[in-house]
Amino acid sequence: MKPHVQASCAAALLAACSAGLAADPAPTESSDPVQRGRYLVRIAGCNDCHTPNYAPSLGQVDEKLWLTGDRLGWSGPWGTTYATNLRLRLAGLSEEQWLHLVRNMQPRPPMPWFNLRSMSEADLKAIYAYTRAMGAAGEPAPAFVPPGSAPTGPVVRFP
């Protein structure tokens, strides 16, 4: 390929990539906390478990259902856990209580608590702001089922 053609292809590729980035920019920490929280919830995997049918539908779930918990259980040697309805949970917490909960929780698998604890305080506050702005919605998730007890409903089983 001739140098001027390579340069034209590279320029076109760069322009296409830049256009894609400009279409969906990542809010910065100085952005509106609600929009920053929405972005973080979307990219951090919160919806994967805390939004019904999010993963099976490849993320094509109406935003009004985001973070309303799920009836799909996660079963293993620890028992069976369910993804909390965060919209209901955070509706009853102050921002300070939310931060304390994240920093001190003792979650059961498969919750990736280490990822949440690694987030900056500004990111955690943004997630709180977004979740609270959405308002309380949905039903509480099923209660934890201890080891040796049989869960009802669908579950993902871990060895």
Image: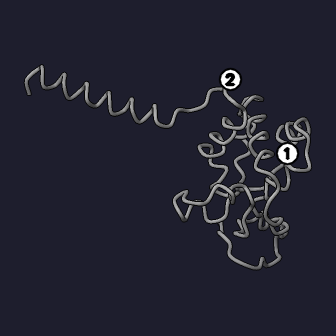
* Label ID, residue 8: none
Residue at point 65% right, 69% down?
A: 156
Amino acid at circle 2: Ser
Callout 2: SS: loop
Residue found 74% across the figure and 40% down from its top: 127
Q: Which mark is residue 105?
A: 1
Image position, residue 77 (x, y; %) = 75, 65
Q: Disc 2 to disc 1, how far (Cα)?
A: 27 Å
Relative height, residue 42 to residue 144 (above, below): above
> Foreground mark, 2 or 1?
2
Q: Quadrant of the C terminus?
A: bottom right
Check the picture and name the quadrant holding the N terminus. top left
Q: Is residue 111 left or right of residue 140?
A: left
**Residue 152 in the image, given as x and y percentages of width and height:** 76, 79
Residue 101 placement: quadrant: top right
Q: Secondary structure at mark 1?
A: loop
Q: Which mark is residue 30?
A: 2
Q: Position of residue 68 (x, y in %)?
A: 74, 59
Q: Quadrant of residue 12?
A: top left
- Give the residue displayed 78% in from the left and 45% down from the top: 133
Residue 135 percent across, percent down from the top left: 80, 52
Q: Nearest the camera: 156 or 38?
A: 38
Return the disc, 2 or 1, that comes first in the chain's sequence: 2
